[in-house]
Image: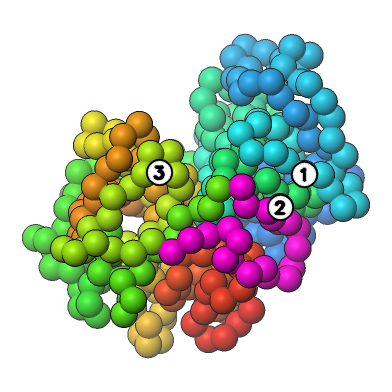
């Protein structure tokens, strides 16, 4: 629901810009003023990222017979029609089966001023194990979007697609960013930003401005050259065992993933409906004054869907000391109804960029225990040997 202007709009000073994404210091301010609240729960300081907030699962999950949007109604009212069973997420948690939608009320609630709106994304680790998530709000007509002035709870739809997973209370599977106005950069502004601070690098060099492929966002290409054995990524195995998303002990990946190797000519044929993890050819650098989102591939360009998770905090691939330049992006790929050929360098996804209200006090990277800075592997943090963060800091 939406509400009239209140004390939040009078007490919350957004920053020096007229529009932009709230950085960590302003998210903390929003928490202190009640714009973000968790009732009887305390929001852990470590859940505040440079430009986003990790959202926590509540105490119970509802098994649904189908997905839905509430429209003019409250989510709780719709559950009377769509809920089949209730699962307790306290303690050891509960197992979520593949192909079945579940709904969990998140612990965080919002009381947004009329000039502030929100957008949610799955966390990168969530997307990399093919767990599909999206946020629903009371009265919501679109997934993952929180209307300006929204006042109420947040609900997370969870659909494991490749592996059965165990989840529990307080697990963070998605993240929320708040923004004022229209922070998204135009294509001309993307070119200007790249000229000021390179956004893409390839083979250790800045991609020349004329070589950028820009059309309502900045396109990235696939890396299908692979390693010495020709491995370019992974494909999810059928009938894999249970994956415990609340465990801090990484597991061996072989039961869950099989390697994908290139064919002659640096190409791969994707099998329909199977889930692949691949890497971008270009390395991405998100400077402190920007955030970025990976958007799904345009289906008119082929029978392909890429990247379910997609938010890049300021500082992804950025090193203030200049010792590290860019991090390649992990691409979550699924062909739809027919086998689909992909080739090395083929543009398959794009980045949209948003300006920050101001630079965050801490950037994404080893200093805050970020999992995927300088990544060389596509597998998520739950698998042994999956990532080697720059600086040797243990990932979150």
What quarter of the picture does the C terminus occupy? bottom right
Which of the two discs, 2 and 1, labels the residue nearer the N terminus?
Answer: 1
Q: Can residue 32 be seen here?
A: no
* Contact (Cβ within 8 Å) of mark 2 with mark 3: no
Q: Residue drawn at (60%, 82%), measured in percent from left and top? A: 393
Query: Of helix, strand and loop, which one carries label 1?
Result: strand
Asked if the magenta segment contains residue 97, the reply would be no
Q: Position of residue 21 (x, y in %)?
A: 48, 50
Instruction: Give the vertical position of 44 relative to 165 (above or below).
Output: below
Q: Residue drawn at (45%, 70%), measured in percent from left and top? A: 377
Write down the residue under mark 1.
Answer: 95
Q: Position of residue 316 (x, y in %)?
A: 44, 67
Dot 3 alpha-carbon crowd within 10 angstroms: few under 14, some 14 to 19, many 20 or more = many
* Contact (Cβ within 8 Å) of mark 2 with mark 1: yes
Which of the two discs, 1 and 3, labels the residue nearer the N terminus?
Answer: 1
| 282, 77: nearer the viewer | 282
What number of labels is visible?
A: 3
Q: Residue drawn at (20%, 44%), measured in percent from left and top? A: 215
Write down the residue under mark 3.
Answer: 334
Extent of the magenta region: 239-259
Distance from the alpha carbon under mark 2 to that under mark 1: 8 Å
Q: Main SS type for the magenta part?
A: loop
Quadrant location of residue 386?
Answer: bottom right
Query: Which is more foreground, mark 2 or mark 1?
Result: 2
Instruction: Give the vertical position of 333 relative to 23 (above or below).
Output: above
Q: Position of residue 269 (x, y in %)?
A: 28, 50
Write down the residue under mark 2.
Answer: 242
């Amino acid at each position: 629901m939406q509400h009239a202007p209140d004390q939040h709009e009078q007490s919350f000073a957004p920053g020096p810009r007229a529009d932009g994404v709230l950085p960590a210091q302003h998210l903390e301010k929003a928490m202190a003023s009640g714009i973000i609240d968790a009732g009887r729960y305390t929001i852990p300081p470590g859940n505040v990222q440079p430009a986003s907030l990790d959202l926590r699962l509540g105490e119970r999950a509802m098994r649904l017979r189908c997905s839905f949007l509430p429209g003019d109604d409250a989510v709780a009212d719709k559950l009377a029609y769509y809920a089949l069973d209730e699962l307790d997420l306290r303690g050891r948690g509960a197992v979520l089966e593949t192909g079945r939608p579940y709904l969990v009320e998140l612990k965080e609630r919002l009381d947004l001023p009329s000039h502030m709106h929100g957008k949610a994304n799955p966390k990168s680790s969530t997307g990399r194990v093919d767990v599909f998530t999206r946020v629903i709000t009371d009265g919501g007509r679109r997934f993952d979007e929180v209307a300006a002035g929204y006042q109420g709870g947040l609900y997370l739809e969870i659909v494991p697609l490749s592996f059965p997973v165990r989840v529990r209370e307080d697990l963070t599977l998605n993240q929320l960013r708040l923004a004022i106005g229209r922070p998204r950069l135009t294509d001309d502004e993307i070119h200007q930003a790249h000229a000021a601070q390179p956004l893409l690098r390839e083979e250790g060099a800045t991609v020349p401005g004329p070589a950028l492929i820009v059309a309502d966002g900045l396109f990235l290409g696939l890396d299908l050259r692979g390693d010495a054995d020709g491995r370019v990524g992974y494909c999810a195995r059928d009938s894999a065992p249970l994956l415990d998303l609340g465990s801090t002990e990484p597991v061996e990946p072989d039961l869950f993933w099989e390697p994908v190797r290139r064919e002659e000519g640096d190409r791969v044929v994707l099998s329909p409906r199977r889930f692949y993890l691949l890497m971008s050819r270009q390395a991405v650098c998100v400077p402190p004054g920007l955030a970025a989102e990976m958007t799904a591939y345009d289906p008119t360009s082929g029978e392909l869907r890429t990247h379910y998770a997609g938010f890049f905090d300021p500082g992804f691939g950025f090193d203030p000391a200049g010792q590290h330049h860019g991090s390649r992006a992990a691409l979550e790929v699924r062909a739809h109804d027919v086998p689909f050929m992909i080739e090395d360098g083929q543009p398959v996804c794009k980045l949209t960029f948003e300006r920050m209200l101001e630079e965050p006090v801490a950037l994404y990277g080893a200093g805050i225990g970020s999992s995927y800075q300088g990544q060389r592997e596509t597998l998520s943090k739950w698998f042994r040997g999956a990532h080697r963060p720059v600086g040797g800091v243990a990932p979150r």
